Image: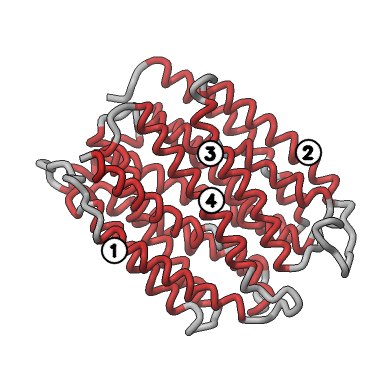
């Protein structure tokens, strides 16, 4: 039984790793479609919507039904979809194919994330184990994001911005997704699906009712605001590095990996910190540090000048300083998710995860589109200064979430 649990955990880790690369490649792909296909920033920003809105839609429609379908089957279906989409990307080098890719990735992730989060609840025995596995999964997600930036940059021709060579990365991603499919297929999931006695419509309505509980409303608003900040920064950071800091395209993507590395370090370390520090003061310290980094980094970014012979040694300080925001941003999302899920009976984890995925997806799209619009109409510094508003808002929602979790658990 323990051996099976370990194998299931590794299959979950690899699944999240693969989707981390694909989901967070949207910033890199935005930069490349602007250069390769000549589309505008406003037009390119819709790729985030093609990724996130299907996540929200699929989660909304299917989250309550996935226990019946089977979490393993859902993950197999999602992995098969993205494998096929990756194979098509280099065969059809068009902007509409990039939209189709993220439509496929988003739809698949809607199935996978609900299944994955729900499975964590079934293979852990208490809140401490649950928080540990959740932080590890989210940390490895960021390791996947970090790996993706370097993987994509290896295929980008920095001397020829319009080159289509970057599309060859998708052959490798298709192979990785295919290997992930086989790992899930041959991993024994020991009774991962609880028995269901209610009708599907009843389960769907139960998910909607859950959303209107006061504490859940505060939680999903917190998750929405967090993802709005993270995706707004993560999606547009490669373009910021390229156009504001004047880094070449390949260096712009590589520099963005600092942000992903900080998120990974922060999430992997958050579980240890929370053994000694209460989550609420820790997250408030993180929010203050995030705001401080924005206020310090943006004026430094305005000093960057064009340098044809730029290297890592001569890169602007802002290229290294601003991505450190990921270190302080990192603990927020897994912490509030784990607190919320572990406050619920396991039978409600699928429905709650559906709500998490829906509002996270909506937050990601909102953050990316708003940042893209401000970036296109004003400048990159203004776009990232805008992040100060949701930082203040999330500080307010976290206060009410903390106060609500002190009173009682959800019933």
Residue at the spot x=45%, y=31% of the render?
218
- Per the image, the residue denoted by label 1 is 77
Residue 362 vs residue 240: left or right? left
Mark positioned earlier in the residue sequence (2 or 1)? 1
Marker disc for residue 143: 4
Residue 255 vs residue 173: left or right? right
In the displayed structure, 80 sits above or below 273; it is: below
Mark positioned earlier in the residue sequence (4 or 1)? 1
Q: Secondary structure at mark 4?
A: helix
Residue 252 vs residue 212: left or right? right
Horizontal and vertical percent position of residue 98 = 51, 73
Badge 3: residue crowd in 10 Å (few <14, some 14–19, many ≥20): many
Marks 2 and 1: which is nearer the front? 1
Split into 4 quadrants, where in the image is the C terminus?
Answer: top left
Residue 172 appears in the figure:
yes
Marker disc for residue 295: 2
Circle 2/circle 1 CB separation < 8 Å: no
Viewer-nearest residue: 188 or 222? 188
Mark 4–mark 2 Cα distance, whole angstroms, equals 27 Å
Marker disc for residue 267: 3
Mark positioned earlier in the residue sequence (4 or 3)? 4
Marks 4 and 1: which is nearer the front? 4
Residue at the spot x=41%, y=48% of the render?
358
């Amino acid at each position: 039984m323990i051996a099976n649990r370990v194998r299931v955990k590794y299959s979950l880790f690899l699944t999240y790793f693969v989707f981390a690369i694909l989901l967070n490649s949207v910033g890199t792909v935005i930069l490349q479609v602007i250069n390769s296909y000549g589309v505008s920033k406003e037009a390119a920003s819709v790729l985030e919507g093609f990724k996130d809105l299907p996540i929200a839609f699929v989660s909304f429609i299917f989250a309550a039904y996935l226990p019946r379908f089977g979490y393993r089957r859902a993950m197999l279906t999602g992995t098969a979809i993205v494998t096929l989409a990756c194979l098509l990307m280099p065969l059809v080098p068009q902007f509409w194919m990039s939209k189709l890719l993220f439509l496929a990735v988003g739809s698949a992730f809607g199935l996978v994330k609900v299944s994955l989060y729900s499975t964590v609840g079934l293979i852990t025995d208490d809140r401490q184990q649950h928080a540990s596995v959740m932080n590890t999964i989210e940390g490895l997600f960021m390791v996947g994001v970090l790996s993706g930036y370097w993987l994509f940059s290896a295929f980008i021709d920095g001397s020829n911005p319009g080159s289509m060579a970057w599309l060859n990365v998708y052959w490798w991603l298709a192979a990785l997704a295919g290997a992930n499919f086989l790992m899930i297929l041959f991993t024994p999931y020991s009774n991962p699906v609880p028995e269901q006695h209610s009708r599907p419509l009843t389960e769907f309505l139960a998910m909607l009712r859950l959303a209107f509980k006061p504490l859940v409303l505060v939680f999903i608003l917190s998750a929405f605001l967090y993802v709005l900040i993270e995706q707004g920064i993560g999606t547009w950071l490669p373009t910021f590095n390229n156009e504001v800091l004047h880094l070449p395209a390949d260096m712009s993507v590589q520099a963005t990996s600092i942000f992903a590395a900080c998120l990974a370090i922060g999430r992997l370390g958050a579980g240890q910190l929370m053994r000694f520090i209460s989550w609420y003061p820790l997250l408030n310290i993180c929010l203050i540090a995030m705001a401080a980094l924005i206020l310090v980094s943006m004026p430094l970014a305005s000093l960057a000048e064009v340098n044809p012979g730029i290297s890592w040694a001569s890169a602007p300080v802002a290229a290294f300083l601003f991505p450190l925001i990921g270190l302080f941003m990192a603990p927020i999302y897994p912490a509030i998710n784990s607190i919320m899920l572990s406050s619920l009976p396991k039978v409600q984890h699928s429905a709650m995860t559906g709500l998490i995925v829906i509002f996270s997806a909506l937050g990601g799209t909102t953050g990316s589109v708003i940042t893209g619009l401000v970036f296109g109409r004003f400048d990159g510094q203004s776009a990232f200064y805008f992040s100060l508003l949701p930082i203040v808002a999330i500080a307010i929602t976290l206060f009410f979430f903390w106060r609500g979790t002190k009173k009682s658990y959800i019933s």
